[in-house]
Image (spheres, helix red, strand yellow):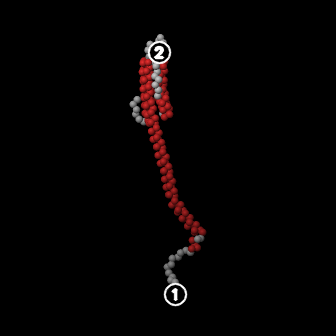
């Protein structure tokens, strides 16, 4: 009873001896196959991560670019509105100047908004140089005419009878046309329609 009997299985599975696995060529082949498999499995993960990173960077760049463009458009609209407002204020100033000149033979001492017009145009709308030059020339011609007429009148020149209203009207019309041209050019830059 106390004796054990070893039973032999007729169909025993043959396992390689533990020493056969530890043989260097076979071990290297198995390890190389495992490493290659791991590497092949890692390639899609690395490529997917790289695509996600590039996509995130491109999306951030595009978003930043659109945000900067929107900010620039808002700034141009704001400065364009200020420029158009200053141009209309200058029109009122010039109309008052002409009325004051015609009635009192003096140029008005009111504050001229032309420096603001020039500053806004040069800083924010430098591409409108031609329209701005036309406007500035019209302003200078009209003021020069009034100054010359005022000097003639005050010197009690014998030839001077009255101020040259036809020339003043011509200069004023040229001024209004140049002013409207600059207002329309600013509105095109702002991409809005302004009646001038």
Location of mark 2 (residue): 153
- Quadrant of the image containing the C terminus: top left
> Quadrant of residue 23 in the image?
bottom right
* Rendering coords of residue 17 (x, y %): 56, 75
Q: Which of marks 1 and 2 is in front?
A: 2
Location of mark 1 (residue): 3
At horizontal 46% and vertical 43% (from top left) the residue drawn is: 67
* Rendering coords of residue 139 (x, y %): 47, 24
At horizontal 48% and vertical 19% (from top left) the residue drawn is: 147
Using the image as rendered, state which of residue 55 and residue 179 is in the foreground.
Answer: 179
Using the image as rendered, state which of residue 183 and residue 105 is in the foreground.
Answer: 105
- Residue 136: mark: none
**How far apart are labels 1 and 2 at the CA level?**
149 Å
Which structural element holds mark 1? loop
Using the image as rendered, state which of residue 191 and residue 145 is in the foreground.
Answer: 145
Label 1 crowd bin: few (<14), some (14–19), many (20+), radius 10 Å: few
| Farthest bottom residue in view | 1
The answer, for residue 179, to whether it is visible in the render is: no
* Rendering coords of residue 142 (x, y %): 46, 22
At horizontal 51% and vertical 82% (from top left) the residue drawn is: 8
- First in residue order: circle 1 vs circle 2: 1
* Rendering coords of residue 74 (x, y %): 45, 39
């Amino acid at each position: 009873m106390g004796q054990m009997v070893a039973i032999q299985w007729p169909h025993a599975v043959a396992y390689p001896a533990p020493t056969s696995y530890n043989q260097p060529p076979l071990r290297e082949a198995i390890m190389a196959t495992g490493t290659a498999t791991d590497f092949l499995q890692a390639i899609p993960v690395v490529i997917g991560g790289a695509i996600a990173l590039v996509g995130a960077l491109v999306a951030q760049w595009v978003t930043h670019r659109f945000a900067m463009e929107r900010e620039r458009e808002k700034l141009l609209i704001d400065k364009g509105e200020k420029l158009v407002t200053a141009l209309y204020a200058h029109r009122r100033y010039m109309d008052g100047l002409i009325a004051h000149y015609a009635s009192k033979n003096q140029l008005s001492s009111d504050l001229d908004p032309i420096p603001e017009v020039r500053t806004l145009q040069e800083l924010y709308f430098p591409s409108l140089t031609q329209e701005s030059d036309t406007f500035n020339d019209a302003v200078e011609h009209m003021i020069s005419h009034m100054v010359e007429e005022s000097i003639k009148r005050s010197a009690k020149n014998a030839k001077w009878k009255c101020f040259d209203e036809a020339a003043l009207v011509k200069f004023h019309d040229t001024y209004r046309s140049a002013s409207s041209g600059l207002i329309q050019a600013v509105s095109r830059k702002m991409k809005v329609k302004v009646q001038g």
